[in-house]
């Protein structure tokens, strides 16, 4: 079935992605086109340009893409100054004998591939960053933050704030040929320790796609999906014969087994090879989007609530 499933913030890109599929484009082309729109959106402070920065005020982006036909994948982590990490991730998949590049190496590769640099920190994001830090530290500490010998203590304080902002964009698509792909892009947890990489660019944690069974992608506190291998778990449970809902439930239950300092939001969306889809969250009243080629507008669907500790 020709279908796209996204996290709710995929709304700004889902029509562009569907246009690609309607024109006969591949699932990967659709995912990249859709996610690029979200990365460009300055009002989305969790992805690409305008994303909230790390503790030192630097925007660091993570992204990944996976091809369900071949299980090929590409990813980048902690990339600065490039607004479209999803496209860099795709080039990693297509041009390198590697899956994941991080930091300066990823930026060097982006330059070699001809991507343009851009300052990603908007004034709106900078102000929120500064206010949040001011609520936790003196102006003097803030001015000297980069020189603090124990920056890790501040990372613990600021990122343990229950209102800490984070999110990510997830796209899963099945094209007219029945091929499945998945893509994820994020600025990660706001005020994270510099160099922190979450689940989004880790194949198996935040993303997995296999034509034979389906695909899954995650948003939420990446440390949880990293520890539980959540996206791969969903697909493996499908392979083991679970229904789509059963596979999602099992993967959420695995998150509940993370007893040491777990906690936090975790959400997933999943698609099976027949075009069935589902969303899960450990928070109440959350939704995701889906759109088939027959629909003129995306539909919002409730995520199944699965509380975890
Ligand atoms: N999963 C992302 C990360 O941990 C953040 C989020 O989706 O809230 O980097």
Image: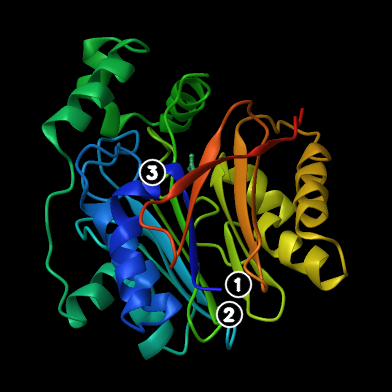
Pick the front one: 42 or 127: 42
In the shown orientation, is residue 114 left or right of residue 8?
left
Q: Is residue 52 above or below residue 228?
A: above
Q: Residue at x 26, y 68 (%)?
A: 107
Instruction: Indicate the secondary structure of the residue bearing disc 3.
Output: helix
According to the picture, the residue beneath numbered tag 1 turns out to be 209
Percent x, y of residue 252? 76, 44
Q: Quadrant of residue 295?
A: bottom left
- Would you say the residues marked 2 and 1 are in contact, meaning their CB atoms lie under 8 Å apart? yes
Q: Is mark 3 within 8 Å of ligand 1?
A: no
Q: Residue at x 73, y 51 (%)?
A: 228
User: How far apart are the two marked residues, 2 and 3, measured between alpha carbons?
Assistant: 23 Å
Decide: few, some or many residues near mark 1? Use Cα within 10 Å; few <14, some 14-19, many ≥20. Answer: many
User: How far apart are the two marked residues, 1 and 3, measured between alpha carbons?
Assistant: 20 Å
Percent x, y of residue 284? 63, 25
Q: Is residue 96 above or below residue 65?
A: below
Q: Earlier in the sequence, mark 2 or mark 3?
A: 3
According to the picture, the residue beneath numbered tag 3 turns out to be 9
Percent x, y of residue 120? 18, 47
Decide: few, some or many residues near mark 3? Use Cα within 10 Å; few <14, some 14-19, many ≥20. Answer: many
Percent x, y of residue 57? 25, 36
User: How far apart are the two marked residues, 2 and 1, measured between alpha carbons?
Assistant: 5 Å
Q: Earlier in the sequence, mark 2 or mark 1?
A: 2
According to the picture, the residue beneath numbered tag 2 turns out to be 68
- Residue 172, can we see it? no
Q: Quadrant of residue 64?
A: bottom left
Q: Is residue 211 above or below residue 75?
A: below
Q: Residue at x 48, y 27 (%)?
A: 159
Give the total of numbered labels. Answer: 3
Instruction: Indicate the secondary structure of the residue bearing disc 1.
Output: strand
- Residue 77, can we see it? yes
């Amino acid at each position: 079935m020709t279908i796209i499933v996204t996290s709710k913030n995929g709304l700004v890109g889902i029509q562009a992605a569907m246009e690609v599929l309607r024109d006969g484009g591949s699932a990967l082309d659709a995912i990249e086109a859709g996610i690029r729109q979200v990365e460009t959106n300055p009002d989305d402070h969790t992805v690409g340009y305008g994303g909230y920065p790390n503790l030192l005020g630097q925007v660091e982006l993570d992204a990944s893409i996976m091809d369900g036909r071949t299980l090929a994948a590409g990813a980048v982590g902690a990339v600065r100054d490039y607004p479209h990490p999803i496209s860099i991730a795709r080039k990693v998949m297509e041009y390198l004998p590697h899956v994941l590049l991080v930091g300066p190496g990823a930026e060097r590769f982006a330059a070699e591939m001809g991507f343009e640099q851009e300052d990603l920190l908007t004034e709106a994001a900078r102000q929120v960053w500064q206010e949040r830090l001011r609520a936790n530290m003196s102006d003097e500490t803030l001015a000297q933050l980069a020189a603090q010998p124990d920056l890790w203590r501040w990372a613990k304080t600021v990122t343990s704030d229950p209102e800490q902002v984070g999110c990510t964009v997830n796209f899963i698509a099945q094209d007219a040929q029945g091929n499945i792909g998945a893509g994820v892009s994020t600025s990660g947890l706001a005020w994270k320790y510099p160099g922190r990489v979450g689940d989004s660019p880790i194949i198996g944690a935040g993303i997995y796609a296999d034509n034979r069974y389906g695909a899954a992608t995650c948003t939420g506190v990446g440390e949880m999906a990293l520890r539980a291998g959540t996206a791969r778990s969903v697909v493996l449970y499908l392979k083991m014969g679970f229904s789509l809902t059963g596979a999602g439930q099992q993967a959420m239950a695995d998150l509940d087994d993370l007893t040491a300092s777990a906690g936090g939001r975790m959400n997933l969306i999943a698609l099976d090879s027949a075009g069935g889809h589902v969303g899960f969250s450990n928070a109440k009243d959350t939704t995701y989007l889906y759109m088939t080629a027959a629909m003129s507008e995306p539909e919002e669907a409730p995520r199944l609530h699965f509380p975890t500790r």
